[in-house]
Amino acid sequence: MSIGLTRHSGRLAAVAATAVLTAAIFVLPAKAAGADPKAVLTTYSDIALAKYEDALTTAKALDTAVDALIATPSEETLKAAREAWKAARIPYQQTEVYRFGNAIVDDWEGRVNAWPLDEGLIDYVDKSYGTESDENTLYTANVIANPSIEINGEKIDASKITPELLSGTLQEAGDIEANVATGYHAIEFLLWGQDLNGTKAGAGNRPYTDYDTRNCTGGNCDRRAQYLAAASDLLVADLQEMVGNWGADGAARKNLLDGDPKAGISTILTGMGSLSYGELAGERMKLGLLLHDPEEEHDCFSDNTHISHLYDAVGIRDAYRGSYKRVDGSVVEGASVSAMVKEADAAVDTELAGKLDATVAKMEAIQARAVGGEAYDQQIGEGNAEGNATVQAAIDALVDQTKSIERAVAALKLDTIAFEGSDSLDAPDKVFQ
């Protein structure tokens, strides 16, 4: 398996091994109708734009719901904000296939979807969380409760919680990746609170009164509202930036369309293979399953992980098919990598297309269990043989489809491609060291 270094590791970080897939180096096959590399890259860019536009639209709806919660805290406004957050995850997760191979996206991605986070940096936590960490001096800094904090010996004025404070000072403060102060997961924690149920039923259960300054629970309700509003505003701004990067004159689009078409097609397949293997199958799924640890699930506060994993898989399939169904039901589609592979080797195209469908089906099986009342953190729990097997089946499908992505690379006679890897898959013994 072609592997490289993954950036988002869990609390028991798996250090990814590195190897390289090598395919013969030739030119791309001759153009054919529907299989022109430049047309494929145009479709890929158009779909990126549509996905980030949908992510932006749903983030704006989340921002509106957050404003309503802050203005009028109630069970209803908290529920509406949570539902808006869940809706916002669906289009965003389908963009993750663009991260690997597109440096502009990868450099930006940590601002909106970094995980896992040490939530004690942000707000109050349960006693079971502990009070200190050998790896993070800001483990329980609790900026919501403290208008002044210290980072690397320097006192920081946090008397007003602003987007600039979150993004410029707190995000990865002290060069520690677990200090996640911005993005979907910071907002998720502020809406749900910690999930203290382990691998038993139940998500986080933050009360709406954590935002009610007249009947405040948790303390510092005004500052908690400031933080939530700042994080929500920042998410909208960050997504607006990425929409611009994929627009007609955007840097991400131009990097692909003005460059070597062969390198562009490699970018698409790099995204598919890296998300399939090292990131999703490895760091987001196998690590948590090995440890039976709910802290290693992607949406750990909301118990929404089954949705995030499913739409990652859908996004991988979209990239191959050159087709995306938008939030409003319309479809963006065009020339595809699938058409190129079919032209080069029809059997490989049939194989890969089938495996992409199979993976989505395995993710839907996880979703079905969650809808039926068994959340993802329960499915990975120790002793849950059926749940574990359902998750493992999806991991196996991701690994299997990556092998077919490698065959597609070979069929197109592309240059060397390195896919992200994970010790969770390649050297699981290291996870327990």
Image: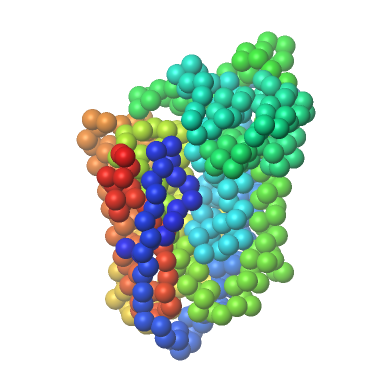
Residue name at image x 49 percent, y 38 percent: 116
Residue name at image x 32 percent, y 67 percent: 404
Residue name at image x 53 percent, y 74 percent: 264
Q: Residue extending furthest front?
A: 153
Residue name at image x 70 percent, y 69 percent: 248
Q: Residue 38, image x and y in percent? A: 56, 79
Q: Residue 316, image x and y in percent? A: 44, 59
**Closer to the camera, 76 or 257?**
257
**Closer to the camera, 126 or 398?**
126
Total count of labels: 0
Quarter the C terminus occupies: top left
Residue 370: quadrant of the picture: top left
Seen in the image, is 228 located left or right of residue 272? right
**Closer to the camera, 331 or 398?**
398
Q: Residue 395, image x and y in percent? A: 31, 50
Residue 392 against residue 155 in the figure, above or below: below
Q: Is residue 84 visible?
A: no
**Closer to the camera, 322 or 414?**
414
Seen in the image, is 295 located left or right of residue 109? left
